[in-house]
Image (cartoon, rainbow, N blue to C red):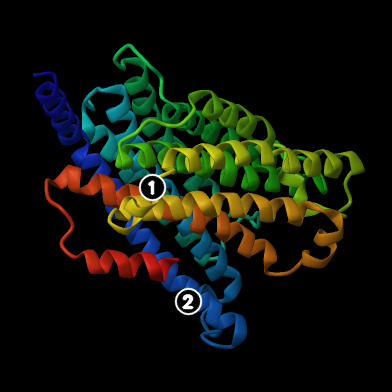
Amino acid sequence: TASDVDRVERALIDASTRLPVMFFYASAIAWLILSTLLALVTGFKLHAPDTLADYAFLTGGRLSPAQFDMLIYGWGSMVGMGTAIWLMARLCRTTVRHPLLLIAGGAFWNLGVLMGVIGVLTGGSTGYEWLEFPGYSAITLFCAYLLIMTWALIMFRYRRSGHVYITQWYLIGAFLWFPWLYAAAQLMLFVFPVQGVMQAAVNWWFANNLLFLWFGSIGLGTAYYMIPKVIGRPVHSYYLAALGFWTFALFSSWTCMQRLIDGPFPAWMFTASIAATILTLIPVATVGLNHHLTMLGHFPLMRYSPTLRFTVFGAIAYTAFSLVGVIMSLRSVARVTHFTEVSIGYTYLGLYAFFTMVMFGSMYYIVPRLVGREWRYASLIKLHFWSAA
């Protein structure tokens, strides 16, 4: 029957993605554990800076960027790319050819992150936030990413003819935006460096767009797949989802100057950034409304589905993250919150409460289909959810 053919097809796709996706997931979890341990040490040193101060590589100025780079390049990027590979294969209805090449790309990405972390800890940091890795590490990361991105685009190119899902829109956008962001930032800061305060503008343009266009796109695309899949009904409105995607792509990339309000820049740059930040309420409203109407009548399923529990939490956190961003962009608020931990808290709200929780949900859905068995202990999943929340 047709259903039997679909089951066999899904099994073949899962078998072809098993090795690369599990490799990406295992690497991501290792980086998350290391980053969390360093975060504990960094947080402790914030209150007792003399602790372990006799060792240069354990000083706060080196531990803090190393810990955060592990989080964004080690955990966030690896788990995002692993999830995107599986989603693209499933939605394109095509198996992954030569999966060992994807594993090779993931191995080189791990090598680049490792070299970058060692470079930062040994004093080779560039001094730019989110771009602290030395040049040799950045080149390794970029080459590894091109190998991974190529296979994602090949899968999309040879997909079965038919409907292009909204999740594919977000994933293809993320895969194309990242090399543009990373290459442009590297060129403008290190190869042909801009002068003076414009370096700070380029730096925060990259950091803000990495948070929105890279992590945000993968997180939203995954949520658009997981919520309808688990509850067994389609997305409420495809047109509303398309509106959310294009407004997200248009306005999010202009919001970077909110971190530099009242700095030595032309006033129009702040005004444009504040206006764009306020206009991001359009994609936030459309995405939130679409998710809510899709979930309507199925919220009790969150008690039984860990994937739904994590994903809905992440979707709600996306709305909170965006609203906090709008409030922080107002000049009257920015004058109070500048040079405080509020900015870091805002970053973690997007990177952990939204993106990471959605990724946890996707892992609880994908891994059993890759290994052919269910999770052993439901109580540990609940403990994981509540402790993370």
Q: Residue at x 61, y 54 (%)?
A: 321
Asked if residue 352 is positioned above or below residue 322 in the image, the reply reads below
Asked if residue 162 is positioned above or below residue 333 in the image, the reply reads above
How far across and how far down the image is residue 348, in percent?
Answer: 56, 60
Category of crowding for the residue at label 2, using alpha-carbon neighbours closer than 10 angstroms: few (below 14), some (14–19), many (at least 20):
few
Instruction: Give the residue furthest to the front.
Output: 297
How far across and how far down the image is residue 317, in percent?
Answer: 54, 54
Q: Residue at x 22, y 36 (%)?
A: 17
Q: Residue at x 44, y 51 (%)?
A: 312
Sequence order check, earlier mark of 2 and 1? 2
Q: Residue at x 45, y 61 (%)?
A: 118
Category of crowding for the residue at label 1, using alpha-carbon neighbours closer than 10 angstroms: few (below 14), some (14–19), many (at least 20):
many
Q: Is residue 341 left or right of residue 386?
A: right
Q: What is the number of the mark on residue 137?
A: none
Amino acid type assigned to the residue bearing label 2 in the image: Leu
Nearest the eye: 175 or 321: 321
Question: Could you tell me which quadrant the N terminus lies in?
Answer: top left
How far across and how far down the image is residue 160, in percent?
Answer: 29, 15
Spatial CA distance of label 2 from label 1 is: 22 Å
Instruction: Give the residue furthest to the top.
Output: 161
Amino acid type assigned to the residue bearing label 1 in the image: Met
The residue beneath circle 2 is 40
